[in-house]
Amino acid sequence: MTLGTFDAPVIGWNVANVPAAIEARAKTINANGGINGRKVEVIECNSAADPNKAAICGRKAVSEKVAAIVRTNIAPTDEAGLYAILNKAKIPVIGANVSTSTGGSSPVAFPLANEEAFAYVPNALSAAGAKKISVVGSAETKSPEGTAGAIAAIKAAGAQPGQIVYVPGNTVDYTPYAAKAIANGVDGVAVVAFPQTNPSIVRALRAQGFKGKIGAATLFMQDKSIKALGDLANGMIFVGQYAPITADLPAMKMFRQDIAKYAQKYPRDEFSLGAWLAMWTFERVAEKLNTVDNKSVLKAMSDLTEFDQGGITPPLTTTKPGKSVNNPKITRAFNPFLTYSVLSDGKYSALTKGKLFHDPVGEEK
């Protein structure tokens, strides 16, 4: 059986580990005899953040008669043309990374995680005791809507807004930005800039003598960055789409084993975990089908109720619409849950004892 995976460059990230993680699981599947005796072939198509190339990828998925697409990682501008093709062909997208209402309302899109972790870092900081919170983001993403959204997020978390600070990507000296962020009694800072600048922001905050809480989305702080920070990362609060990669879960151990065996040179992060989870989800759905094609997989994915995800996320239900707070036109946000973790000496633990997963939207209510 043939599967597709769509990829594209994303500003600030090297996401070559996405197709590598999918291939790693596919190799494990094939080494174990395939799915019901059928080997899995994965076809990668890179849209290069070009809507025209994204449409070419969509037509390729149709011509290759793929049973599903596992984990899209494409630019928002690519979604309209791509999903127009996939909707018509009824090709399911498992692990869809949707960021617009086009993909977010498509009947073939099946996101497996809450894609808005960065927006809820203030919630985790508030849960950790912060009362006045600043947000440090990237100047390249600055917009009136983004600023208003950051302030609204802080207020929704039950905290007082501090400063909204934007750092240019070519910054050399982060000191003035850090100083501005912690001014006026701020005791919590959400660092949600690009991954290549976030470690420098954390260093600058610590260099200013800041003793308050620093939070970040796990996706925005890769393992190598955290290791490079050393003791400066101790006590940081992380909001994740999934259980921590170091978690002692059977499914997470499978992920780590697959990556170690077949994709060792690539980083283990939420990009690779999300891709692997999409492939593992397809594997378990497909093995229960007599005939595996796009239509049978689409129907099966549409009928999931409390589908076990091995503790990487809570069980998945796709029979009910799921809405996004940041974009009410998104109706496929099936999994609202996020993880709040605190880092200590390289180990993650639940911020709230005995509670790993949080529904930030439900808790705000």
Image (cartoon, rainbow, N blue to C red):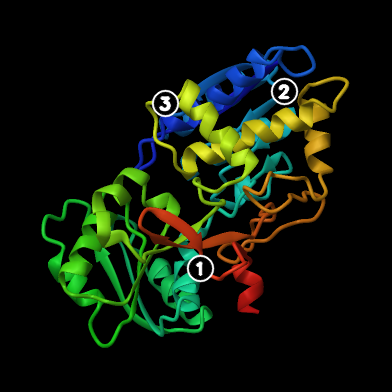
Q: Amino acid at mark 2?
A: Ala
Name the residue that disc number 1 marks.
351
Q: Amino acid at mark 3?
A: Gln
Q: Are marks 2 and 3 in contact (CB under 8 Å)?
A: no
Q: Nearer the viewer, residue 3 or 271?
A: 271
Q: Is residue 310 visible?
A: yes
- Side of 50 where 304 appears, left or right: right
For label 3, the crowd category at 10 Å Cα-Cα, with few meaning under 14, some 14 to 19 and many 20 or more, is some
Q: Nearer the viewer, residue 324 or 187?
A: 187
Q: Nearer the viewer, residue 142 or 354?
A: 354
| Picture residue at 44% right of the left edge, 38% below the top | 268
What element does badge 3 sit on? loop
| Picture residue at 71% right of the left edge, 39% below the top | 108
**Image quarter hosting the N terminus:** top right
Mark closer to the chain start, 2 or 3: 2
Q: Nearer the viewer, mark 2 or mark 1?
A: 1
Q: Residue 205: x and y, percent?
A: 22, 68
Q: Which residue is farthest right?
A: 290
Q: Residue 303: x and y, percent?
A: 84, 43
Mark closer to the chain start, 1 or 3: 3
Q: Is residue 74 visible?
A: no
Q: Amino acid at mark 1?
A: Leu
What element does badge 1 sit on? loop
Q: Mark 2 and mark 3: span between their CA atoms?
A: 28 Å
